[in-house]
Image: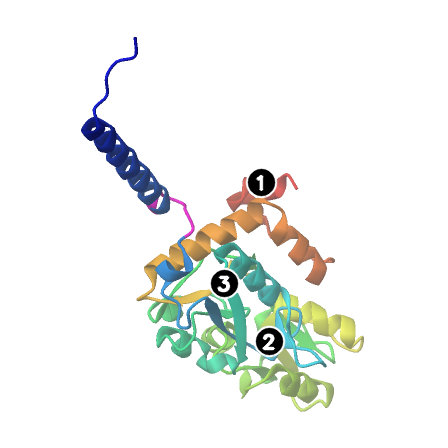
Amino acid sequence: MRPFISEQTSIAQHRHSLLAAVLLLAASALAPGSIASADDLKLINPNELTVVALSDQPGTSFVDAKGENQGMAIDLMNAIAAKLAVKPVYRTAAIAGVIAAVAANQYDTAAAGLAVTEERKKSVDFSIAWNYGQLTVLVRNKLPGNDPSALKGKTLGLLTGSVQEVYARANFKETDIKAFQQQPAMINALLANQVDAVFLGSYDGSTYLARYPELSVGLIAGSDVYNAFPVAKTRPDFLVAMNKAMNELFDDGTWLKIYKKWYASVAVPRQLLEQHPKLAQQ
């Protein structure tokens, strides 16, 4: 004989089951490592990732002949947006104003080769590293040596607000520094012998070396400088979600695929192999 279950008992059990299901879903949404929903991210524009990018950073963040944003940082940001289930929308700006714009919540983040510095960390938070690079001096005419003293009395071009500018002003004391707003103008000045050398990241440098065979590496400044995506300090939940998405991209092979697309001739940075064991196995 089946036991008698009252209607009140049945209703109570049903309510209990519904409550348990709601609590389980809430716990799942708040579980460590889970990617927040678009609403939780508190994006500037609902369901859109508003991103500031550069127009003149070849291989990393640039605008092609069709007017479309391209580069490794762009491809990574597109992959992050897919993980977050939002649409990336890009706007371009000069590198000098990018950090301030992100800090002021004019953009959710920036897709560019932005090196993390202590000074920049005062204004914004940064994601985990997505790339490492060295600081490269390119020349048209060989320098008299391969150390900083070879730049004594020379004119060195670099980008305003770049990590190279900070490094050069601290370490190349006897060098005449000429700051540029954009890379193409800086490279053109080198090709026209208006500056003796230019200072930029190794990935940008490799692109220009391939494009202009008359250029060569004058010297390399060893560095553990790394690139990361900036986020306003008022957006901790967004930063957590971005970092989780990025870790997944390293682990599932997406980061490596994008890296090989843009920098096939450059070895994967040692630091990233150490930070992401699954990357070393790919």
Q: Which residue is drawn at 41% across and 56% down?
A: 37
Residue at mark 2 to residue at mark 3: CA–CA distance:
36 Å
Say which element carries label 2.
Answer: strand
> On screen, 245 above or below 66?
above
For marks 2 and 3, the one nearer the N-term is: 3
The tag on residue 182 is none
Choose top left, top right, bottom left or bottom right for residue 108.
Answer: bottom left
For marks 2 and 1, the one nearer the N-term is: 2
Q: What residue type is labelled 2?
A: Phe
Q: Which residue is drawn at 40% across and 66% down?
A: 231
Q: Name the residue under label 1.
A: 278
Q: Report x, y in % for residue 113.
A: 55, 68
Q: Which residue is drawn at 41% across and 46% down?
A: 34
Q: Residues within 10 Å of mark 2 (few under 14, many from 20)?
A: many
Q: Mark 3 points at which residue?
A: 86
Query: Is residue 204 magenta-colored?
Result: no
Residue at mark 2 to residue at mark 1: CA–CA distance:
33 Å
Tell me where the magenta segment starts and ends, as one range.
30-35
Q: Which residue is drawn at 40% across and 74% down?
A: 102
**In the rendered structure, are the residues bearing label 2 and label 1 in contact, judged by CB atoms less than 8 Å apart?**
no
